[in-house]
Image (cartoon, rainbow, N blue to C red):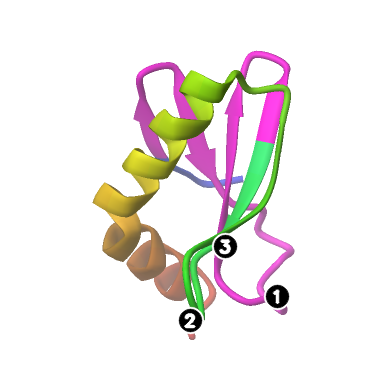
Amino acid sequence: MPTVLLKDGFRFFFYSDEGSEPAHIHVKKGDAEGKIWLEPVSKIAYLNGFTNTEEKQIRVIVFEHLEKFKTQWHGHFNQ
């Protein structure tokens, strides 16, 4: 589970066995967790247990780091 970014208590990462899926990033903070598709467009798959404020923070962080997340994904999975 490579961690791509730690920011504001959020951990953004992906599972090494999910390379057959489209590019996406997981996010976790405490017991809350989520998944965001990165391609073909950035889109929330699910966000469970986050407050509305945290969901907004996640959206901003993903927007700010979208290219980094995609580069890390493709580099890890050699795509």
The single residue placed furthest to the bottom in the displayed view is 79
Was residue 8 drawn as part of the magenta stretch in this picture?
yes
The image position of residue 71, as x and y in percent, is: 34, 69
Q: Which residues are magenta?
A: 5-33
User: How many angstroms separate mark 3 from mark 2 (CA)?
Assistant: 15 Å
Instruction: Give x and y (percent) for residue 77.
Output: 54, 74
Q: Residue at 49% of width from left, 23% of height from top?
A: 54
Picture disc at residue 21: 1
Q: Which mark is residue 78?
A: 2
Q: Is residue 10 left or right of residue 71?
A: right
Label 3 crowd bin: few (<14), some (14–19), many (20+), radius 10 Å: many
Q: Are marks 1 and 3 in contact (CB under 8 Å)?
A: yes
**Alpha carbon separation for disc pair 1 and 3:** 8 Å
* Lower sequence index among marks 1 and 2: 1
Query: Residue sitting at 28 percent across and 65 percent down?
Result: 67
**Above or below — where is 61 with respect to 45?**
above
Amino acid type, residue under disc 2 in the picture: Asn
| Outermost residue toward the front in this view | 52
Residue under numbered circle 3: 24
Q: Amino acid at mark 3?
A: His
Q: CA distance from mark 1 to mark 2?
A: 13 Å
**Secondary element type, mark 3:** strand
Is label 2 in a helix, a strand or a loop? loop
Q: Residue at x 48, y 74 (%)?
A: 41
Split into 4 quadrants, where in the image is the N terminus? top right
Q: Answer with mark 3 or mark 2, whichever residue precedes in sequence.
A: 3
Tell me the residue at 53%/44% (across/down): 13
**Residue 36, magenta (yes or no):** no
Left or right of 17, for residue 64 = left
